Image: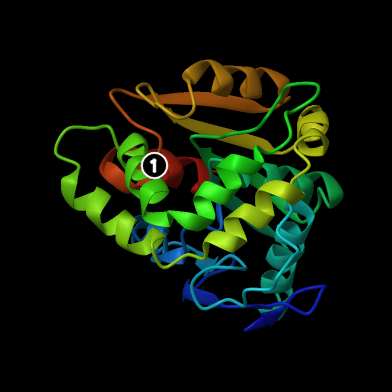
Amino acid sequence: MATSADGARIAWYRYGGGERTTLFVPTWNLVDARVVGHQVAALESHTNVLTYDPRGAGASERPKRGYDFPHHAADALAVLDANGIERAALVTASRGLNTAVLLTTSDPQRFDRIAVVGPYMNLEPAPPSPDPERLEALRNDWRGFIVPFMHAVFTEPDSADVIAEMIAIGLEATPDVIATQETELDWRRPARLLGSVTCSTLVVHGEADAPVPVALAERIVAAMPNARLELIPGGGHRPDIRTPELVNPLLLDFLLGG
């Protein structure tokens, strides 16, 4: 366990070895480190790999509050410090890019590159406030949220097994954690910092991503000085989970390059 800045205990897992380190930054408190298993398997023979369960999920502590992006960034730093890692590449997905942006802009020398799958950021000048009725619905009917959400994430043909696996993981999450996070998030700060991310960035996005359209990925890439976009034909929101055979070669080439 690593101890974060606010005292929360974060469960981490280490694989492989070598001089380089790749840190997987969680996307959301909805799922835990199991979802990046395909990427760990591809990378562990090449680099030192660190994953961790986000606060509020898996084996990590579930505090009553503290689920905004700065807390998640502090958790990442705690995991690195617990392992004595001074420099790392970051891999994340979806809203995890917000945390990665905070990390790389606060300490550019510590993070040499970012790879992100299906990035989600709210780039609107004034993001809307959370809908109280929606938050109450999350608390009262968690399965009613998880099941359609996972179907929207994995729109590729023959995804039934992956959807069932992700639903099972999602049902282990705590609805109050997700609802609390929605009230705490400040989307504006990471969005304002996009142009200050100086490290090389690879954005991988499914062409058929239903929750996050390709147009948003294109806006994110355009705002980052050293970013490039790779599209996965027919890919949904998490092609790294559904079709790792298409995503992993891109990640390996990017992460292991000079």
**Where is residue 70 drawn, in percent x and y?**
79, 55
Residue type for callout 1: Phe
Up-down: is 222 above or below 8?
above
**Residue in the picture at 53% in, 40% down:** 94
Left or right of 68 in this view: 23: left
Q: Secondary structure at mark 1?
A: helix
**Residue in the picture at 83% in, 30% down:** 192
Quadrant holding the C terminus:
top right
Residue 126 seen: yes
**Where is residue 44 drawn, in percent x and y?**
41, 66
Q: Quadrant of residue 169?
A: bottom left
Up-down: is 117 above or below 145?
above
Up-down: is 74 above or below 156?
below
* Label 1 packing within 10 angstroms: few (<14), some (14-19), many (20+): some
**Where is residue 136 drawn, in percent x and y?**
57, 50
Q: Quadrant of residue 208?
A: top left
Q: Which residue is mark 1?
A: 149
Left or right of 227 in this view: 8: right
Left or right of 7 in this view: 20: left
**Residue in the picture at 67% in, 72% down:** 79
**Residue in the picture at 50% in, 75% down:** 14
Residue 248 seen: no
**Where is residue 120 drawn, in percent x and y?**
58, 34
